[in-house]
Amino acid sequence: LAPSTYLSYQSAIRQFFIFCAEQNIAPLQATPATMVRYTAWLALLGTVAANSLQPYFSAINKFFRDHRRQPIAVGELLADARRGLEMLQHRLLPTTARLPLPAQVALDILHAANTLHGTFAWTPAALPQMQRFRACLAVCVNYTFFCRAETGARCQTGDLVVDRPSQQICLFVRKSKGDQRRDVADKPVIAIPVAANPVLADLLIYYTEQRATFCKTFYNTPPPLAFWSCSPAEPSAEWGAAATISAWLTLALRTVNSAAPAGFKWTSHSLRKGAASAA
């Protein structure tokens, strides 16, 4: 499992152990019926939504499998309990529905990036302009390649290149959902013809060259490992995939003076949904 999954499971299994201690139950003696009581116990805590319960149950099932036991957080009885809890819970605030990003808005952002790229010199004083350009370009890349947020935000130097001999824009999918166990050599490279989006290809070449020159000139270092990090001073290790892409999308939308319709929102996943919908 991925390290982030273990962190999530640690918290979930800790809650289960607290429940078992309070109920005087040996954890490995728990049954599917115990899981219904555990669901009620979590409900009384008032801190877990019914639609957020799965990691709690997955952690317990993993715990049982690791001890060569059959998983217990399964079955219709538990499903009924979860549905019952969901019917008892009500949102205090209205939800904002997420919409696909229209292709025309993505195209506007691409044009904005193309307009921005010659309007500033790459110097430390121009970091805000560099970051605005970077946000527009990253949004366009995620849209063009149907990327999940983790694929786009965690792209490393060398993963996204314009290959001149083959005239293709190539993306090495280093990070994607559910592939933690796959060897790096087995992960895919997605390629699209430069002719399909020559503006994007030119902007990627420009970004790659300017970023390398900027880091060498002002920091005497090669470009950071994180491809979208404009400067070694940027804390890219703290980037959260979805939050980072959503923040860049917000900045790009401000640049083109665009926003989702009232009562709706565009987020990082709107890029993937938008590209799929447009295609």
Image: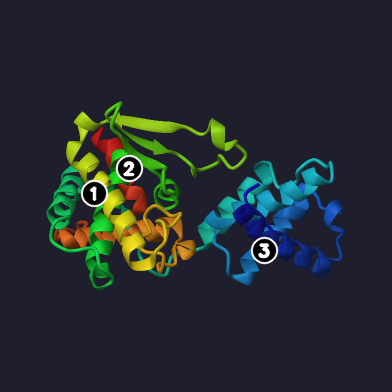
User: What is the CA distance from the residue labelled 1 to the residue labelled 3?
Assistant: 45 Å
Residue position for label 3:
11
| Separation of marks 2 and 1 at Cα, in angstroms | 28 Å
User: The residue tagged with tag 2: helix, strand or loop?
Assistant: helix
Q: Nearer the viewer, residue 196 or 105?
A: 196
Judging by the rendered image, the residue that carries numbered circle 1 is 206
Density class for disc 2 (Cα within 10 Å; few <14, some 14-19, many ≥20) is: many
Check disc 1 and give the amino acid type.
Tyr
Which is nearer the N-term, disc 2 or disc 1?
A: 1
> Residue 131 lies in what quarter of the image?
bottom left
The residue drawn where x is 38% and y is 38% is 171
Q: Quadrant of the C terminus?
A: top left
Q: Classify mark 1: helix, strand or loop.
A: helix
Q: Going 19% across and 36% down the picture, which residue do you hit?
A: 198
Residue linked to disc 2 = 273
Q: Amino acid at mark 3?
A: Ser
